[in-house]
Image (spheres, rainbow, N blue to C red):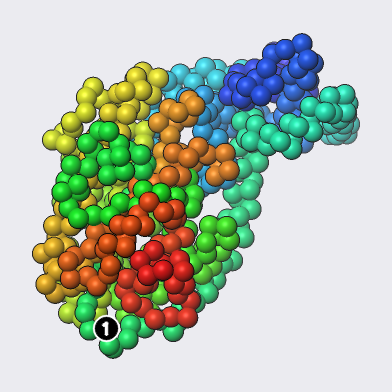
């Protein structure tokens, strides 16, 4: 069968609009319902989406590129459609960064039979047709004329329709910006380009020194030992310490902990939040590039001769621990507590020996948890922890009830409760030699089906509060010289990741010109 390039591009564009944009039209219909007034605009939107995709395909079309590009786009779009339809995520540049920084085990968690159906029906089948059809061969001159004609025609149709329904398009583009995040494959193509552009720019990054003047005064004779736990996807409202009706913190509740119930994250994903937490830049001034081009909290502590260790049971430190001791606890050869996966509590094995080995100076140990990493919450805790049943034992949320998903999630919180209580026990054992503290903060929250949204990573401006409102718990040994009463009093005040940097500097009693007391939760 022979077909012209124009037709092949057109059919593929129509295919994308019909089968890859369910989430887009669903969101559009919420804002512009199917009424007589809107019907013309809605029809034009489908045409504009088709001509926009067709325009892009035409630009990159040539004798040698048409088929390979269509094949790659069909496969990618089938998988993207699956994640958009089932988890309500959008593929922005941060999401792409997350996907590329995710390891095999995490990716494996996301694979399901339903994903394979999508890839087969919306990917492999159309790819087969694209593969077997023969493109009509023309001279390069004729091909160039066709290409110009097709792209101009697409532009013309788009412009005419935009003018015809200009009132609608103005509101669509200005007031409902997030809607375009759901267009497929246009938005993820845009995001890939943005990601590549950022990566090229960041490869030229030089890390600027920061806080070189940092020191701990000799008058500070007490040694501090702080374990900073970077949590994963733990929502504030799922901690019974914050009033959740289920007992998800049975062990922490027995300790004298302070839960900061109004803590908000810097971003909605690990890749964005973690470097932001350790950076001096507040959220409104932070960017990936700024974070990577400056030394961070751990570097400043090193300048002040604090012993710094990062143990990681998540993906990695996202560039934060590049210049300090780093140990990978996802590796079963290093982590002694692994069953279906390596457990967070494995990071505590041998920690006493590490502490005993540091004869001088303060100690900061960062433990980066696997925590509540979704969608397979049921894998995030050993069987002995499970208390809330029935549990969703699949990564396909549509096969589970809200209750089963919530149960799995809450069981994973129980495991964090167990883990943090174990840390407190270790710190108590060391409190005759150290002023000891635990600082726990999740990197971001999680959606558990509210508004049909799951997981996390939506752009901050459109993310629901549950993806930003995070769990955070502090504990101090009795000999730690702080005013616990006043801390309890301000525990319901609004704080954020912006406060972490200066709070840790304050706790370690580091003197440096960059310390901002007004952002230190403890001393302000
Ligand atoms: Zn995370």
Name the foreground residue: 398 vs 483.
483
Image vertical order of residue 361 relative to residue 128, above or below: below
SS of the residue under disc 1: loop
Quarter that holds the N terminus: top right
Image vertical order of residue 25 relative to residue 242, above or below: above
Image vertical order of residue 24 relative to residue 35, above or below: below
Q: Quadrant of residue 19?
A: top right
Residue drawn at 30 percent across, 39 percent down: 243
Q: Quadrant of residue 382?
A: top left
Residue drawn at 65 percent across, 41 percent down: 190
Quarter that holds the C terminus: bottom left
On the image, the x and y values in percent for residue 30 come to: 62, 22
Res 464 visible: yes
Residue drawn at 78 percent across, 15 percent down: 37
Image position of 335 (left or right of 270): left
Name the foreground residue: 509 vs 63.
509
Image position of 222 (left or right of 232): left
């Amino acid at each position: 069968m022979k077909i012209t390039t124009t037709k092949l591009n057109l059919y593929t564009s129509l295919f994308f609009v019909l089968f890859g944009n369910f989430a887009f039209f669903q969101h559009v219909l919420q804002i512009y319902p199917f009424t007589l007034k809107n019907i013309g605009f809605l029809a034009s939107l489908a045409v504009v989406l088709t001509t926009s995709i067709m325009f892009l395909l035409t630009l990159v079309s040539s004798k040698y590129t048409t088929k390979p590009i269509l094949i790659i786009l069909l496969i990618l779009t089938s998988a993207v459609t699956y994640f958009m339809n089932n988890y309500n995520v959008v593929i922005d540049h941060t999401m792409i960064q997350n996907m590329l920084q995710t390891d095999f085990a995490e990716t494996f968690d996301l694979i399901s039979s339903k994903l394979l159906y999508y890839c087969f029906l919306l990917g492999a089948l159309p790819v087969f047709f694209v593969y077997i059809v023969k493109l009509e061969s023309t001279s390069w001159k004729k091909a160039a004329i066709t290409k110009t004609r097709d792209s101009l025609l697409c532009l013309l149709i788009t412009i005419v329709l935009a003018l015809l329904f200009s009132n609608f398009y103005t509101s669509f583009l200005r007031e409902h910006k997030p809607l375009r995040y759901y267009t497929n494959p246009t938005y993820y193509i845009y995001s890939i380009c943005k990601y590549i552009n950022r990566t090229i720019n960041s490869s030229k990054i030089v890390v600027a020194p920061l806080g070189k003047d940092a020191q701990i005064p000799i008058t500070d004779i007490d040694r501090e030992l702080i374990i900073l736990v970077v949590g994963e996807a733990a929502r504030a409202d799922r901690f019974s310490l914050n009033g959740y009706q289920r007992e998800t913190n049975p062990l922490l509740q027995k300790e004298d902990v302070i839960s900061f119930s109004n803590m908000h994250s810097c971003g909605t994903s690990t890749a964005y939040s973690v470097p932001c937490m350790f950076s001096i830049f507040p959220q409104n001034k932070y960017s990936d590039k700024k974070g990577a081009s400056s030394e961070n909290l751990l570097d400043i502590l090193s300048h002040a001769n604090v012993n710094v260790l990062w143990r990681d049971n998540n993906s990695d430190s996202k560039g934060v621990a590049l210049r300090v001791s780093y140990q990978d606890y996802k590796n079963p050869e290093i982590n002694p507590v692994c069953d279906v996966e390596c457990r967070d509590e494995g990071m505590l094995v041998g920690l006493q020996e590490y502490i005993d080995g540091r004869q001088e100076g303060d100690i900061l140990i960062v433990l980066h948890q696997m925590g509540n990493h979704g969608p397979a919450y049921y894998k995030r805790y050993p069987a002995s922890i499970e208390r809330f049943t029935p549990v969703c034992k699949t990564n396909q949320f549509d096969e589970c009830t809200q209750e089963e998903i919530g149960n799995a999630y809450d069981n994973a919180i129980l495991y964090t409760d167990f883990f943090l209580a174990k840390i407190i026990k270790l710190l108590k054992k060391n409190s005759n030699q150290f002023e000891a503290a635990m600082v726990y903060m999740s990197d971001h929250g999680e959606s558990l089906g509210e508004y049909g949204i799951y997981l996390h990573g939506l752009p901050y401006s459109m993310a629901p509060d549950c993806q930003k409102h995070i769990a955070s718990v502090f504990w101090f040994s009795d000999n730690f010289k702080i005013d616990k009463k006043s801390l309890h009093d301000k525990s319901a005040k609004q704080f954020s990741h912006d406060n972490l940097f200066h709070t840790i500097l304050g706790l370690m009693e580091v003197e440096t010109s960059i310390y901002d007391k007004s952002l230190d939760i403890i001393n302000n």
